[in-house]
Image (cartoon, rainbow, N blue to C red):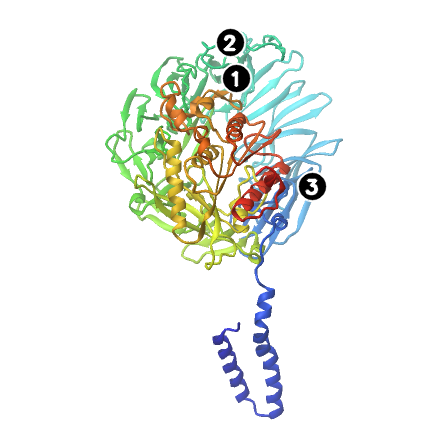
Amino acid sequence: MMDINNYTNYMNFYNQIIRIQKCCWVTFFMKATIFLLFILQLVTCPLRGQELQKRNAQSSDYHRWSDMYMHDVSPDGKWVLYQLDYDHNMDTMVVRSTTFDKKYNFKGLKRYNFLNDEGLVTLRQDYMEILNLKKGSKKRFDKVTNYAYSESTHQIVMLTDDGKNKKLSILDPKGKVLKEKESVSFFSMSPDGLKIVYVTKSDAGDTLGIMDIKAGYTEKILIANSTAKWDNFVWQQSKALSYLQHNGKDSKTTLSYYNLQRSVLKTLDPMTQSGSLGNIEITTYYLYPMMLSDDGESVFFATKRQSVPSEKKDKNEPQIWYAGEKVIYSRQERTEDLKSKPNLAVWYPMSGSFRVISSPEFSEVFLTGNQQYALLADPLLHEPAMELEVVKDFFIKDLKTGTQELLVKNIIDLKNRLLPSPSGKYIAYFLENDWWIYDVVEKKHTNITAEIDTDFSEDNGNIGVGYPCGNPGWTDGDQEILLYDQFDIWAVKPNGTWRKLTSGREKEIQFRFAYNIGSSFKKQNFDGAKRATININKDIILSAKGIDKKSGYFLWSEKTKEKCIVYEDAMIDNMHYIEKAKTFIYQKQNFDKSPFLVRQSQNKEPNVFYESNKHQHQFKWGKAELVSYKNSKGKLLHGALYYPAGYNPQKKYPMIVHVYEKQSQNIHNYIKPTLFNLVGFNPTVLTLQGYFVLRPDIDYEIGKPGESAVDCVTAATKAVIDKGIVVASKIGLMGHSFGGYETSFIVGKTNMFAAAIAGAPPTDLYSFYHSIDWDKGKANMTKFNVGQLRLGVSAFQAPEIYMKNSPLASAQAIDKPLLIWSGKNDNQVDWHQSIELYVAMHRLKKKSVMILYPEEGHSFMKPENQKDLSTKILQWFDYFLKEEKQTQWISKQL
């Protein structure tokens, strides 16, 4: 109907116009015109509203939706590059302006670089293109095999191969050729973009040279007219270079080092070097890539024993599994033999000395921050552990002297619990829920968090293991280590003096470092990791997540502490800060609002410059709401509740409850509707089909995973029922993997749910305890004591607890229809676990169907099976929750 206020306003406007008219014929003409323009429009408004009314989305519409991922922002913040992923692996890369309506689409993009003058260089198929983003003009270069862009010199180094000749060209950002060199087959640019190393080919042999692309393209020939081959080039900025040389005649590999500042070339040949390495060979190994030390004076590389012909095993030969071995046979098959694993070594070219660092006995290795010491562990020392994490004893080795001594015992998860400081002065480690510091020079251990009244370990789902909340890095000069507790960031000196940088606990907001210009927080360090130096004397961007599920970013400084940039009831991430322009660019989304990109200058209102999936406005859509409830222990918990599309408060709807540990943190995630789901669950699709969807958080009690799930899920479901928006007799339950376990256990303990679906569920915990995860080769019993199943004891200590928490033990009490599905190639949860529950349901004459998919694993990879599973899940719930009884595969046996 017409809005009476709008009608009155239009009539007043109409009368005012009529009163100012002087001539009758003009008055008549104006009356007719106004009638046609305004009154007729208002009369026909209801009909137009019906035409523009939002419609229900059908599965045939789903292909129009995409997922969006923002990848990069240009240095000036004027352009962003993002990816749109559609069903069937159809994707598009887009470069879009942040200030005006202009974009460029790319298909088959291999590489790209933003140029400093509003340009973009891309590599696609076998051609490179330089695009002027502002003007739209393009310059194409065919037969390009590789390129590199120097931010320091604003030049593009390009390699082309037309089949007859390989040529190296150096271009300016507009594509003008500045330098060319013929017969170049390879080049590598130094990290600072000042120099390149290249290889040229001629009838006389190959030549290895270095070109200074900043200082007039001057060249230095290292080796001329050689039959050798070179690869694995690594730089220390443009100060030093190292690479492998392979001699054609004897296939011998040597290691070379060139110091550009001293113009000194050195070579290491293990077989002829004084103090021979014996029968050791230089090799390549993905875990131990060649690396130059920060001072450019030493080279780290992988070595192995000279190959010994191994006996070929017949696939039909019987396997012999020894119970007395530390590692079971299946795990041996899937892990590297420590005797044949390459070792890490170091070479000091200027002195000529070298040392093999790791060994089969101490096969895990990483370095201190200054690369003067190595940290070593024997991963088999405490095996067989049969726990989720294996504890290790770590030793520290002086690389100059070779002396080695015990550092600390019983450390697990070396990449997060044993962390060298960037400058090499200290080693931080997390032991018994406290952070400790080891002074490398003083050889002194200090518990630096014992006197701080907070917990630096996180719950991690109540699995019984104290995980550190995190250590993002250190301040300059290793003066303070930066630590996380549940909410805040702390700066702690090596002597234990501390200060709290944020006030997250008071605000119920978790603060974390989100952006640190010029470095990343965590870097690979061979078998371990190392942390960055964080300059907290300048403004720092912090990510923020609230207990109420709000998210955003704050700007922090020593003087002002945290000041809000953006913090809303939404999912806000992918922050980029353009320091020169004082501009923030980030991504924002809600369950009902497809991801959009925002540009926000300091002290100005944010500007949305791109919204994905705009067509969504044509369709009815749901919304998300955070619900609260308490379990039987009185603990306050949350759940994500999604409303059906086109929700009508005058009616009640069926609901589907999806279970898997904690899920409320995903409440603001936008999920595109698709039937191509790995495990058949898509909350958006379910809401489009007229269902409420509830994703509750579960709090676990050790020894009672099943009972905890029943307690929390029924409490959450009742909280929604009490809102009066769902049909209490039309509620379904579903879950996959551990969620499948929870589903099949819950339906044996309550009749609250009218139908259920359990995907790949562990159903008999006693037999599952004695099974193997064939993907890893590890026994599944590692997941039970302190792992996801949280039973706290072994099956031999308390078999009754395993039986009590097994869905199979309650199969007789399942009175509602249960669909079980699994892949027959599932190596994580043996599909025979599904068989056990199915056989029980068959024997007990329960309403149940099992679907097994050949050639599928724990999650489904084949699109046709993804779609089939998603369709069958919808059909199952439609049959039992909506009384749509036309589905033959269900009604056939039920």
Q: Position of residue 481 (x, y in %)?
A: 33, 33
The dot on residue 256 is none
Residue bearing the label numbered 1: 330
Q: Residues within 10 Å of mark 1 (few under 14, many from 20)?
A: some
Crowding near pointer 2: few (<14 within 10 Å), some, many (20+)?
Answer: some
Q: Give the residue displayed 37% in from the left and 51% down from the top.
A: 564
Question: Mark 2 or mark 3, which is nearer the start of the sequence?
Answer: 3
Query: For numbered disc 1, what is the local secondary structure?
Result: helix
The residue wearing badge 2 is: 277
Residue at disc 2, secondary structure: loop
Left or right for 657, reference 219 = left
Question: Whole-Å distance between the Cαs marked 2 and 1?
Answer: 34 Å
Is residue 575 at all visible to an observer of this figure?
A: no
Q: CB under 8 Å between callouts 2 and 1?
A: no
- Residue 644, position as x, y percentages in the image: 50, 52
The secondary structure type at the circle numbered 3 is strand
Question: Residue beneath label 3, please?
Answer: 141
